Image (spheres, coloured by chain):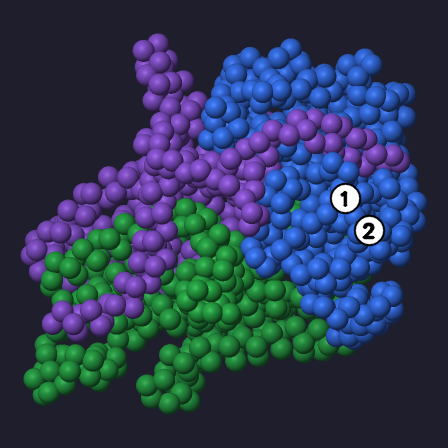
């Protein structure tokens, strides 16, 4: 396809646009890059005033934790390969191996397997191999940058951050599944009904979306703590205490997220021609059958995009989870905030940074894998205002 | 669609929203007109507390709540009308300030101070987020296909990162001798303390919010750009429209529903600004409406919390957001009627 | 790398098995505890967990959760970690039980000093005291030939001398983050000037001579501080010390241990502690005394309360203190005060001694009002008198809402 002449751009415009993008990417990535760098240093280096000290980590190196040039080269190469595989090949593999109709599940599974594989290679295999290579490499094998994984070990092994990770996994999976199940049904119903009731449900949902969460959350706490007493007349001796229960938090997060979910899915379903399901209904299907056999096969782009937003909400939530979960069921974000709010030491802070970087990694992977689906889902009409 | 079918489809969703949003909201609404107080008694209490070696005992009159037979605190609840609202709004003080011509004094009352910040924060970030999002979307659309994927990935990072962590990562760059502050000091050759005065903290908070939300606007606009009608664009070119005119008359109108959508989401989210206040510890200088409510609800060491005022300020926050949303709601109504 | 992790894991498991022997019996009853999350609590709850079946929660939201969770029936937790501030709601609501019988039965190792008595009944068992006192860089003061200041006026003089010598970035640090911390710093100074917060009829009394003096002294000290003092909490001040940026600060005793941690600190062995400075001649050191300790819930069966108390006693034993000697100023036998504890001990044993932070509802409301209104004074928006008037107004509104004032 040749570009029409008038669409060709002057050099100044192209350079300006590229320069602007480069600057934006720098601003977008720098703070995240920086906390990643900090998380690998001893506290003295991590909070040093001189940026070079933070990057090179002399104190960390002096303690015998360092990376040689060889390590860096190999590490970068592996990272690049990983990114390339994720962006280019992962999609193909998922398409090939997942049974038709379960493509979304295939993606989730693919992402998890890929992520675990990466962790195994990068953190398990590489250090061993490189340790041997460094000894042989001479000047290339001498540490130049201080880098220590002690904080990650402290966070994941000693502070049992994996249990927070599992809790997050449980809450997030629950929220995404329930939210999408309930939301797709409601979104479809709202999209196909022109009644005034549907309109008012949408408007009220919009107002609900605008509510400050701290108001709602403070209202839940006393009820959740005393739920065993409150529910006893109805449920008898088995009445549960909702406080601390992941299921209760899932219900709360799903509800808080419903307004956004139903708005997005409604817009998406509106972009699917109503003739499709009307044709099915003429053939004798009920609304539910039409939904199941005609709409479900074509709704995945919109559902994936909406699901991603639900995922972000549940995964990143702080207010609800910190107040309504007890320590055994605590998710990752409040656990990290705990490092700061209690009487912290500087080591705690760097450990918190390491934990913060750890919880960002799955988000990275997720966006890498689903990036195309986000854009195509949005393009397909999940947002039409 | 028959009502029963409709109800079956939306039922679960509506039930959840009623139970977990509408019900608490109703109770907040009622509490804003009520005052629940414990029945107090004053008794002489001797308290002995440890020193390093020996104890000190003091006898003093203490106020403490009366307990009923079941061991619960006895409380009285009365309807007090707008008392809690009056305590939050402090209209008397506002009147005095206006009468004295000292407009600045109004801003020393927490609610008005919070309202001022919340509104400026919302209205300043709105055009910035939309402008930056659109600019990035256009630039990415203009970039070579081979690197688009990577650029979209990097651009999305600030949006997906956990807000608390994003705010902290920016805070660390600037607090004390953080490297950005050190860099600025070196560049401007003067001492800079970003957290020492209100306006610099506000600037950081604005920067953080735009940084965090612009990617959301970007990805939505970028998706919209993929569906711009090429025929219209080409005919615009044939008509001799300049690049700017094409943007102004073809692309922006095409994206208009999306711009409204982003504006709507952004208005709602930034009106309840909260993480920034905590993340940048700006309470000394600026506070927001949601923070005010949160602060009323936080119990102090003695367990007191201002439920009445918290409910009132929550309701006032809600009224504010509904007013802000009215233009957008009217548009939705028109669309609905038209559809 | 892998080997190291495995070795560490092995060591850890060895330590835990070794530690099980640390408990004299095996606890069969499932118990839960809720407390704040600082180092001392970590050590105590770890020691309790050695007895088995103990779930310890160190939660930063404990202030919000504790009163509600203890009021539930049955209580969601058996053991609570409190301080003299946070015990107030539990006492007021009657959700913790008297411990006299249990102390008589199992508390043989406790000293009378540890028993918190309300009207003669033991309601809590203290494990440590805490206070804010002066920490200083001995090397700097020695180099410049300066004596350790004992009053706040001397602090100002010494700070001026340090500033003139230009040896550190800022002579002073302070925990003046707006909110709770700033209010607490004011409380210290205010009490140092002999002020009292409320009158006998619960009306506020901070808008007084002592209040103005306290604010003015605090303002005077800020001239020697990092201009970002309104965001600096204890962790930040501690970090400033560790990075050698400040020379003196009135800081929590529980923070002292970190100054000598070589992994974080660049000033190991250079920081010393002295009594909190006096605000006025003949007064008490300008600070408050705090204690931290345990309480047992009321809404649980007596048998569970007994198990909970026994486990708590295992957590507060000499063995625990020996493993965590520098984490706090312990009240438990076996504690050997180190160099950094001198300041706290000098403060607590001063004559007249500083008062214990008052555990009253009025104080809670006053603390909040101070925390919210004082920043305006330091940002220059209001004068001292106006600020204190605003504090009193805020307190009065809150006290009326809480039913304390008519």
Residue drawn at x 32%, y 31% is B82
Dot 1 crowding, Cα within 10 Å, few <14, some 14–19, many 20+: many
Q: How many marks?
A: 2
**What is the x, y in percent for residue B76?**
44, 37
Chain B appears what colour? purple
Q: Choose top left, top right, bottom left or bottom right for residue C14.
A: bottom right
Q: Of B119 and C50, which appears nearest the observer?
A: C50
Residue C103 bears which disc, if any? 2
Task: Answer with left or right where residue C294 lies relative to residue B245.
Answer: right
Residue behind mark 1? C122
Chain C appears what colour? blue
In the rendered image, the quadrant that contains the C terminus of chain B is bottom left
Secondary structure category for the residue under label 1? strand
Task: Answer with left or right where residue B308 lies relative to residue A332.
Answer: left
In the rendered image, the quadrant that contains the N terminus of chain B is bottom left
Q: Of B103 and C346, which appears nearest the observer?
A: C346
**What is the x, y in percent for residue C238?**
73, 39
Instruction: Give me the C-alpha separation between circle 1 and circle 2.
Output: 8 Å
Q: Choose top left, top right, bottom left or bottom right for residue A314.
A: bottom left
Q: Of A32 and C14, which appears nearest the observer?
A: C14
Secondary structure category for the residue under label 2? helix
Residue drawn at x 64%, y 39% is C88
Is residue B86 visible in the rendered structure shown here? yes
Chain A appears what colour? green
> Can you say whether A274 is above or below C58 in the image?
below
> Can you say whether C299 is above or below A184 in the image?
above
């Amino acid at each position: 396809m040749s570009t029409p002449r008038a669409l060709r751009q002057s050099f100044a415009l192209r350079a300006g646009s590229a320069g602007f993008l480069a600057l934006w990417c720098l601003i977008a990535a720098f703070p995240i890059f920086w906390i990643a760098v900090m998380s690998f240093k001893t506290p003295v280096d991590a909070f040093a005033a001189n940026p070079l000290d933070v990057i090179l980590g002399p104190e960390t190196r002096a303690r015998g934790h360092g990376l040689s040039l060889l390590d860096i080269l190999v590490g970068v190469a592996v990272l690049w390969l990983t990114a390339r595989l994720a962006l280019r090949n992962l999609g193909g593999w998922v398409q090939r191996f997942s049974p038709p109709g379960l493509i979304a599940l295939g993606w989730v599974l693919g992402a998890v397997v890929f992520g675990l594989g990466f962790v195994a290679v990068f953190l398990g295999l590489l250090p061993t191999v490189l340790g041997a290579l460094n000894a042989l490499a001479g000047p290339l094998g001498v540490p130049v940058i201080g880098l220590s994984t002690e904080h990650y070990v402290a966070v994941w092994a000693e502070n049992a951050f994996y249990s927070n990770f599992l809790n997050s996994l449980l809450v997030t999976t629950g929220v995404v599944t329930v939210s999408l199940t309930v939301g797709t049904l409601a979104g479809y119903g709202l999209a196909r009904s022109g009644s005034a009731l549907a309109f008012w449900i949408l408007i009220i949902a919009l107002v609900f979306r605008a509510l400050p969460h701290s108001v709602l959350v403070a209202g839940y706490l006393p009820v959740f703590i005393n739920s065993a007493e409150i529910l006893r007349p109805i449920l008898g001796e088995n009445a549960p205490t909702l406080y601390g229960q992941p299921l209760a938090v899932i219900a709360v997060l799903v509800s808080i997220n419903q307004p956004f979910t139903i708005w997005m899915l409604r817009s998406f379903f509106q972009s699917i021609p109503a003739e499709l399901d009307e044709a099915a209904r003429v053939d004798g299907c009920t609304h539910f059958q039409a939904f199941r056999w005609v709409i479900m096969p074509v709704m995945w782009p919109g559902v994936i995009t909406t699901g991603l937003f639900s995922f972000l909400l549940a995964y990143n939530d702080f207010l609800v989870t910190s107040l309504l979960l007890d320590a055994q069921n605590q998710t990752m974000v409040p656990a990290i905030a705990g490092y700061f709010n209690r009487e912290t030491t500087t080591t705690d802070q760097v450990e918190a940074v390491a934990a913060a970087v750890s919880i960002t990694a799955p988000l990275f992977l997720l966006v890498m894998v689903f990036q195309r689906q986000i854009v195509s889902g949005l393009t397909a009409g999940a947002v039409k205002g | 669609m028959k009502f029963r079918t409709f109800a079956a489809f939306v039922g679960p969703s509506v039930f959840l929203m009623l139970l977990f949003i509408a019900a608490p909201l109703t109770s907040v609404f009622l509490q804003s007109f009520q005052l629940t107080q414990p029945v107090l008694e004053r008794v002489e209490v001797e308290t002995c507390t440890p020193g390093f070696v020996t104890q000190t005992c003091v006898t003093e009159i203490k106020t403490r709540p009366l307990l009923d037979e079941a061991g619960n605190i006895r409380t009285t609840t009365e309807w007090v009308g707008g008392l809690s609202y009056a305590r939050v709004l402090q209209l008397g003080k506002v009147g005095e300030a206006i009468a004295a011509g000292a407009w600045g004094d109004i801003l020393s009352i927490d609610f008005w101070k919070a309202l001022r910040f919340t509104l400026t924060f919302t209205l300043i970030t709105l055009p910035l987020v939309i402008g930056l999002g659109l600019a990035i979307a256009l630039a990415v659309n203009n970039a070579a296909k081979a690197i688009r994927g990577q650029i979209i990935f990097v651009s999305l990072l600030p949006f997906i990162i956990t807000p608390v962590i994003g705010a902290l990562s920016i805070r660390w760059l600037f607090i004390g001798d953080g490297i950005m502050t050190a860099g600025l000091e070196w560049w401007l050759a003067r001492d800079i303390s970003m957290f020492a005065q209100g306006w610099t903290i506000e600037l950081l908070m604005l920067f953080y919010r735009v940084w965090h939300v612009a990617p959301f606007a970007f990805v939505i606009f970028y998706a919209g750009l993929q569906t711009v009608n090429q025929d219209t664009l080409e005919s615009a070119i044939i008509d001799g429209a300049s690049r700017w005119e094409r943007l102004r008359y073809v692309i922006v109108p095409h994206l208009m529903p999306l711009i409204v959508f982003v504006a709507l989401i952004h208005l709602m989210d930034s009106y309840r600004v909260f993480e920034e206040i905590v993340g940048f510890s700006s309470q000394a200088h600026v506070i927001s409406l949601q923070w005010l409510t949160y602060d009323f609800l936080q119990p102090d060491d003695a367990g007191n919390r201002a439920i009445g005022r918290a409910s009132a300020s929550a309701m006032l926050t809600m009224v504010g957001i509904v007013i802000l949303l009215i233009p957008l709601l009217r548009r939705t109504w028109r669309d609905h009627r038209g559809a | 790398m892998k080997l190291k992790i495995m070795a560490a894991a092995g060591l850890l498991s060895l330590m835990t098995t070794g530690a099980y022997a640390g408990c004299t019996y095996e606890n069969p009853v499932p118990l839960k505890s809720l407390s704040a999350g600082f180092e001392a609590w970590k050590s105590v709850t770890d020691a309790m967990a050695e007895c088995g079946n103990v779930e310890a929660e160190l939660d930063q939201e404990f202030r919000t959760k504790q009163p509600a969770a203890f009021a539930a029936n049955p209580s969601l937790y058996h053991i609570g970690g409190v301080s003299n501030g946070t015990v107030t709601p539990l006492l007021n609501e009657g959700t913790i039980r008297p411990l006299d019988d249990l102390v008589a039965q199992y508390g043989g190792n406790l000293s009378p000093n540890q028993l918190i008595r309300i009207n003669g009944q033991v309601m809590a068992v203290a494990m440590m005291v805490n206070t804010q006192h002066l920490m200083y860089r001995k090397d700097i003061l020695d180099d410049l030939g300066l004596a350790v200041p004992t009053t706040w006026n001397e602090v100002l003089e010494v700070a001026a001398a340090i500033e003139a010598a230009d040896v550190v970035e800022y002579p002073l640090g302070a925990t003046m983050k707006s909110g709770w911390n700033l209010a607490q710093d004011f409380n210290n100074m205010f009490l140092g000037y002999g002020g009292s917060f409320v009158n006998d009829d619960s009306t506020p009394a901070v808008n007084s001579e002592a209040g103005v003096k306290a604010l003015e002294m605090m303002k005077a000290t800020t001239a020697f501080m990092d201009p970002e003092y309104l965001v600096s909490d204890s962790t930040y001040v501690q970090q400033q010390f560790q990075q050698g940026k400040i020379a003196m600060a009135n800081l929590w005793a529980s923070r002292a241990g970190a100054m000598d941690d070589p992994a974080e600190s660049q000033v190991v062995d250079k920081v010393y502690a002295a009594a909190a400075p006096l605000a006025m001649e003949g007064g008490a050191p300008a600070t408050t005394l705090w204690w931290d300790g345990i309480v047992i819930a009321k809404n649980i069966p007596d048998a569970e309360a007994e198990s909970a108390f026994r486990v708590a006693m295992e957590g507060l034993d000499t063995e625990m203190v020996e493993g965590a000697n520098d984490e706090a100023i312990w009240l438990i036998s076996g504690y050997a005060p180190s160099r950094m504890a001198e300041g706290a001990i000098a403060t607590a044993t001063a004559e007249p001694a500083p008062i214990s932070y008052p555990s009253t509802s009025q104080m809670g409301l006053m603390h909040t009002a101070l925390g919210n209104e004082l920043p305006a004074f330091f940002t220059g928006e209001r004068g001292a008198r106006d600020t204190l008037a605003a504090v009193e107004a805020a307190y009065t509104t809150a006290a009326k809402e809480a039913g304390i004032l008519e």
